[in-house]
């Protein structure tokens, strides 16, 4: 166990009470549903199972502690963002299903806040929306196209609104802003508070949460651990970026690292110049994703991509920090808000997220084998995992009045990633391509043809 009750993993872990691990599995156990992974997906699945049927026996098996992985370390965006476009979703189940999926994602953002409040989880939920800023002409073209696309699918300004430069800076004084867009369907949260609170909530409802209990074998009707076997009619794999560490799942998802940094608490005089009064989450429209939020204690927590993929889908604590990437994130944040020049950064951390080969998350459950899976959120997993957990619970109970199993991501699987070294070459080549495209667009203001071709190949 890391020293001081898992402190040092992230800003979020440093700003909650020290974590004392729950008891590990001590002997064989029989339940109705065994869930592997005590992150958002696993805990939401357990939550919706036991709220629908308090008699169902559920056990959650976790190698470390609830919220050890991405669920406790992420950027704290509870958003309706989805990695696959509406066009790609429509190709799976039709236009109506794609639109319904997007509406469900919109609804899920607010639902997370309502459930957290009902369960007494103070996760600092503030639904101030998401501001996407364009800082060069190429980014502005993309923002306009994205808003136009949503409008073409029937979503109005109440869902996605185009902003001019003045409207952007009224929300956040981002330097060199040419325009942007805003959607209300995003909340800033404290992610570790949410995941730890969910673990407490499911325990209160009778779920057995077993921490410090690694799953060494996951199969039909059973989960084998060093301390005993959990036998269950249904087994849910909810391991997201750690899925490649599960035997037989090496190529199911690629574990991509996203890193974060955080400032010291800023004085009100600084915030008066920055804005973000409603804790609106923010990013610019570059290809190599960045993301930021104003925390309840007055910091900016800011993250982004750019860390390398590690050969063989390796996952290790040493990859959580990369000084080159963290220095780049600090520099970018100061570029966005020059008033931060000279500010102290108190935290640097990171973690892995799960990326499927086609960048399309999935939820599925096989009634013959009892095996279920949800994941591949490509970093957009806070609200998405809540909808996935609700969907998995409906599939397992075979009770789906909301027709969640008819949504575009339900019942599908992505093809496996290529074997090494092709996987290593491909993933890192894409990261390099996106970084190069961003540099070119900043320099010329013209959209990168290479990046556009990549997104088109994905159907985005």
Image (tube, rainbow, N blue to C red):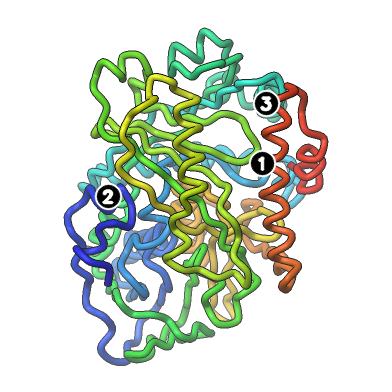
| Residue 193: mark | 2
Bin the neighbour count of mark 1 within 10 Å (Cα to Cα): few under 14, some 14-19, many 20 and up: some
Q: Position of residue 394 (x, y in %)?
A: 48, 61
Q: Position of residue 198 (x, y in %)?
A: 30, 56
Q: Assign a secondary structure to mark 1.
A: helix
Residue labelled with disc 1: 435
Residue 402 to residue 294: above or below = below
N-term mark: 3 or 2: 2
Q: Assign a secondary structure to mark 2.
A: helix
Which residue is at a point 39% across and 87% down the rendered structure image?
A: 225
Nearer-the-camera pick, 246 or 173: 173
**Mark in the foreground, 1 or 2:** 1
N-term mark: 3 or 1: 1
Residue 398 shows in this picture: no
| Residue 20: mark | none
Left or right: residue 196 versus residue 214 is: left
Which residue is at a point 59% across and 69% down the rendered structure image?
A: 313
Which residue is at a point 46% across and 68% down the rendered structure image?
A: 316
Quarter location, residue 311: bottom right
Quarter location, residue 41: bottom left
N-term mark: 1 or 2: 2
Q: Assign a secondary structure to mark 3.
A: helix
Which quadrant of the rendered structure holds the C terminus?
top right
Residue labelled with disc 3: 442
Which residue is at a point 64% across and 60% down the rendered structure image?
A: 356
Residue 453 shows in this picture: yes
* Inter-mark Cα distance, 3 to 2: 37 Å
Q: Position of residue 239 (x, y in %)?
A: 48, 67
**Mark in the foreground, 3 or 2:** 3
Residue 302 to residue 145: above or below = below
Which quadrant of the rendered structure holds the N terminus?
bottom left
* Inter-mark Cα distance, 3 to 1: 11 Å
């Amino acid at each position: 166990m890391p020293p001081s009750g898992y402190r040092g993993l992230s800003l979020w872990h440093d700003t909650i009470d020290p974590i004392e691990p729950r008891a590990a599995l001590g002997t064989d156990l029989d339940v109705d549903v065994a869930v592997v992974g005590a992150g958002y997906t696993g805990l939401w699945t357990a939550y919706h199972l036991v709220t629908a049927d308090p008699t169902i026996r559920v056990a959650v098996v976790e190698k470390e502690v609830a919220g050890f992985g991405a669920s406790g370390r992420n950027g704290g965006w509870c958003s309706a963002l989805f990695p696959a476009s509406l066009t790609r979703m429509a190709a799976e189940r039709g236009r109506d299903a794609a639109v319904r999926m997007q509406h469900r994602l919109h609804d899920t953002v607010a639902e997370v806040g309502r459930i957290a409040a009902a369960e007494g989880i103070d996760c600092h939920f503030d639904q101030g929306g998401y501001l996407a800023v364009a800082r060069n002409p190429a980014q502005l073209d993309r923002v306009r196209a994205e808003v136009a696309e949503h409008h073409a699918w029937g979503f109005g300004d109440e869902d996605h609104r185009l902003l001019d430069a003045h409207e952007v800076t009224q929300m956040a004084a981002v330097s060199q802003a040419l325009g942007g867009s805003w959607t209300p369907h995003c909340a800033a949260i404290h992610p570790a508070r949410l995941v730890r609170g969910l673990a407490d909530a499911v325990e209160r409802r009778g779920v057995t949460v077993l921490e410090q209990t690694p799953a060494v074998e996951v199969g039909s009707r059973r989960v084998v651990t060093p301390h005993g076997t959990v036998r269950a009619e249904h087994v849910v794999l909810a391991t997201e970026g750690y899925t490649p560490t599960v035997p037989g799942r090496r190529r199911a998802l690629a574990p991509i690292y996203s890193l974060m940094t955080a400032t010291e608490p800023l004085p009100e005089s600084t915030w008066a110049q920055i804005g973000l009064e409603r804790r609106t989450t923010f990013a610019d429209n570059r290809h190599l994703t960045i993301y930021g939020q104003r925390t309840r204690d007055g910091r900016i927590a800011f993250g982004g991509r750019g860390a390398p993929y590690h050969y063989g889908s390796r996952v290790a604590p040493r990859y959580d920090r990369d000084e080159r990437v963290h220095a780049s994130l600090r520099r970018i944040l100061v570029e966005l808000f020059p008033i931060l020049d000279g500010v102290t950064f108190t935290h640097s951390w990171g973690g892995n997220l799960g990326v499927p080969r086609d960048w399309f998350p999935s939820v599925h459950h096989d009634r013959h084998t009892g095996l279920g899976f949800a994941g591949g959120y490509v970093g957009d997993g806070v609200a998405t995992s809540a909808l996935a957990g609700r969907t998995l619970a409906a599939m397992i109970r075979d009770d789906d009045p909301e027709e969640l199993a008819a949504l575009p991501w339900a019942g599908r699987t992505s093809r496996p990633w290529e074997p090494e070294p092709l996987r290593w070459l491909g993933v890192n080549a894409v990261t390099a391509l996106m970084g190069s495209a961003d540099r070119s667009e900043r320099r010329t203001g013209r959209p990168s043809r290479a990046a556009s071709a990549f997104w088109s190949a994905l159907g985005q």
